[in-house]
Amino acid sequence: QVQLVESGGGLVQAGGSLRLSCAASGSIRSINDMGWYRRAAGKQRELVAIINGGGWTTYADSVKGRFSISRDDAKNTVFLQMDSLKPDDTAVFYCNVEGRPIGSLIYKTFWGQGTQVTVSS
């Protein structure tokens, strides 16, 4: 069983910063991509940022230059540093991990429970 536990969401004023964390635990042998997605009210879920096992990163155009994704492989944890937050960033943020469970030959996709980020104007 693999679990993803997210933390760091909350309420912040426009222009402020938040740092999200997501730790993978349980029977996981290795991890490839780690990422963050978000879903705003009334909208579809969208990619925010991804970091692969080699450290290469990809960002949505809307967050480039403001958000930074990183990972700590020793702790199976991915971070999302969010600066210069805007009201349009308000959403539920979900952690996403592509990992290979112990005893499995294939990689599977796991999701966190979501953490609310609210940016006030």
Image: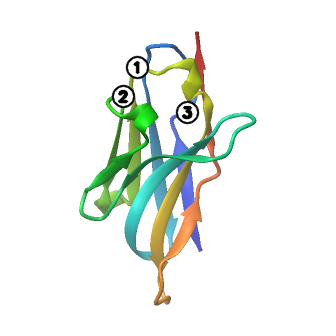
Marker disc for residue 84? 1
Residue assigned mark 2: 66
Q: Secondary structure at mark 2?
A: loop
Please determine whether, in this image, residue 93 is positioned above or below residue 28. above
The reply to whether the C-beta atoms of the residues labelled 2 and 3 are less than 8 Å apart is no
Residue assigned mark 3: 9
Q: Secondary structure at mark 3?
A: loop
The reply to whether the C-beta atoms of the residues labelled 1 and 3 are less than 8 Å apart is no
Of the numbered discs 1 and 3, the one sitting upstream in the chain is 3
The reply to whether the C-beta atoms of the residues labelled 2 and 1 are less than 8 Å apart is yes
Report x, y in % for residue 14: 50, 13
- Residue at the far right in the pictured view: 42
Of the numbered discs 2 and 3, the one sitting upstream in the chain is 3
Q: On the picture, is 72 further left or further right than 113?
A: left
Q: Residue at x 67, y 45 (%)?
A: 44
Question: Label 1 sits on what residue type?
Answer: Ser
Please determine whether, in this image, residue 62 is positioned above or below residue 103. above
Marks 1 and 3 sit apart, C-alpha to C-alpha, by: 15 Å
Q: How dense is the environment of label 1, judged by Cα within 10 Å: few (below 14), some, or many (20 and up)?
A: some
Can you say which quadrant of the picture contains the C terminus?
top right
- Of 40 and 101, nearer the camera is 40
Q: How dense is the environment of label 2, judged by Cα within 10 Å: few (below 14), some, or many (20 and up)?
A: some
Question: Label 3 sits on what residue type?
Answer: Gly
Q: On the picture, is 33 further left or further right than 48?
A: left
Report x, y in % for residue 49: 42, 47
